Amino acid sequence: MKRNRYAVLGLALAGSMAVFVGCSKPGGEDASAAQKLGGSFTTEMTLDMEDLQAAGTLSRMGNGVWSVSFGEPSTLAGVVLDFCDGEVTASYKGLAFSVPQTAMPAKSVLGNLIQVVDSLAQQEEITGEASDGYVLVEGDLEGNPYILKLTKSGELAGFEMDNLDATLGFEQFQSGASVATATTAVTEVETEMSAE
């Protein structure tokens, strides 16, 4: 009789374990993305943040050297923010000026994105959590949690920071030296035009 009770108890425990395992949430497995963040690249970007919705082109020329050219909204169209080793400069049609107030929220979230990507660019392998075909890399910048979304092939797909109420989306990711060369050429032409 005692043996039957132990057998029934063992079966009940095994059954409940199967239920718990079967009910665990889908996804959540570890996943890795190809390393495409270490070189130069350019991507179309959209930014949703509080009352600001903006769009433009984000370019990485190297570690700590980035450029963002805004196309929308009209208050930011044509403004270029250049990030170089922690310093940020703004220009419009080659004329440099201080970062406009309308661009300050964008500057903040973009600065955080740059820190995260430049940090990941130093790693041989990028790992995160698998979710809907993407790799989510979660972390924390000075107490501010973030989620960087990458495709499995290593392209930027999204970036979120809840405390800043900011979401970035990326499309048309292109990597390679030609991106850096083209961006540098455009910057040099604008500089020459402003000097004339």
Image: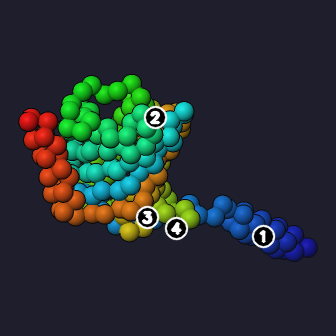
Percent coordinates x, y for residue 135 in the rendering:
46, 61
As measured in the structure, the alpha-carbon distance from the residue carrying label 2 to the one carrying label 4 is 25 Å
Residue of label 4? 133
Q: Residue drawn at (13%, 40%), measured in percent from left and top?
A: 193
**Quick check: 37 above or below 188?**
below
As measured in the structure, the alpha-carbon distance from the residue carrying label 3 to the one carrying label 1 is 38 Å
Which part of the image, by quadrant, shows the N terminus? bottom right
Residue of label 2? 144
Residue 15 position by quadrant: bottom right
Q: Nearer the viewer, residue 162 or 103?
A: 103
Residue of label 1? 15
For mark 2, give the secondary structure.
strand
Residue 175 position by quadrant: bottom left
**Quick check: 87 above or below 128?**
above
Task: Give the label, 3 or 1, closer to the camera.
Answer: 3
Dot 1 or dot 4: first in sequence order is 1
Q: Nearer the viewer, residue 85 or 135?
A: 85
**Quick check: 164 above or below 60?**
above
Q: Residues within 10 Å of mark 3 (few under 14, many from 20)?
A: some
* Amino acid type of the residue that numbered disc 4 sits on in the rendered structure: Gly
Q: Residue drawn at (14%, 52%), measured in percent from left and top?
A: 185
- The label on residue 151 is 3
As measured in the structure, the alpha-carbon distance from the residue carrying label 1 to the one carrying label 4 is 31 Å
Task: Give the label, 2 or 3, closer to the camera.
Answer: 3
Percent coordinates x, y for residue 123 in the rendering:
28, 56
Q: Nearer the viewer, residue 148 or 175?
A: 175
Asked whether disc 2 touches disc 3, contact meaning CB atoms under 8 Å apart, the reply is no
For mark 3, give the secondary structure.
strand
As measured in the structure, the alpha-carbon distance from the residue carrying label 4 to the one carrying label 3 is 7 Å
